[in-house]
Amino acid sequence: MFPAGRPRTNNAIAAELRERNPALRVSGGYLSALRNGGRANPSIELLRALAAYFEVPVDHLTAPGTDDEAALAAELVMREAGIRALALRAEGLGEASLASIVAIIDNARKLEGLPAAGHSAQNPADE
């Protein structure tokens, strides 16, 4: 399990992919090269494994678009994985427990100098 709030590294993702799919040959370096455009055309097996890992359809990883769009999509998927993990853990909790968790997250945002949830750092009018 990866610490909450920290992005997964390419090496950690590659290790988990290999654990789930022992026949899959993938390294953190290769994932980095794919993300940064240094390599292209990953195998369908790797695409399926990545799609399963991030819980998205394979089409999400293969849809036509610009390289910038693909890099942005990959980054968003990485961020969404952490958010999804939080949401799954909160499933079934009562209203009081959820309110406590929201208060903890709000406090953590304040401690890290982040704007309040739902407010943009670029738009001071939101604050």
Image (cartoon, rainbow, N blue to C red):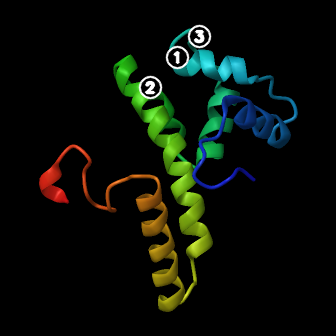
79 left or right, relative to 72: right
Residue 12 lies, in percent from the top left, at 74, 36
Residue at 50%, 42% (x, y): give it: 77
Residue at 45%, 76% (x, y): give it: 103
Residue at 58%, 83% (x, y): give it: 92
Residue at 61%, 15% (x, y): give it: 33
Q: CA distance from mark 1 to mark 3?
A: 8 Å
Q: In terms of secondary structure, where does tag 2 sit?
A: helix
Q: Which residue position is annotated with label 2? A: 71
Residue 37 lies, in percent from the top left, at 51, 13
Q: Nearer the viewer, residue 78 or 103?
A: 103
Lower sequence index among marks 2 and 1: 1
| Identity, as a three-letter code, of the amino acid under mark 2 | Ala
| Identity, as a three-letter code, of the amino acid under mark 3 | Arg
Q: Which residue position is annotated with label 3? A: 39
Look at the numbered discs 2 and 1 and tell me whether their residues touch, using CB distance below 8 Å: yes
Look at the numbered discs 3 and 2 and tell me whether their residues touch, using CB distance below 8 Å: no
Looking at the image, residue 126 lies above or below residue 72: below
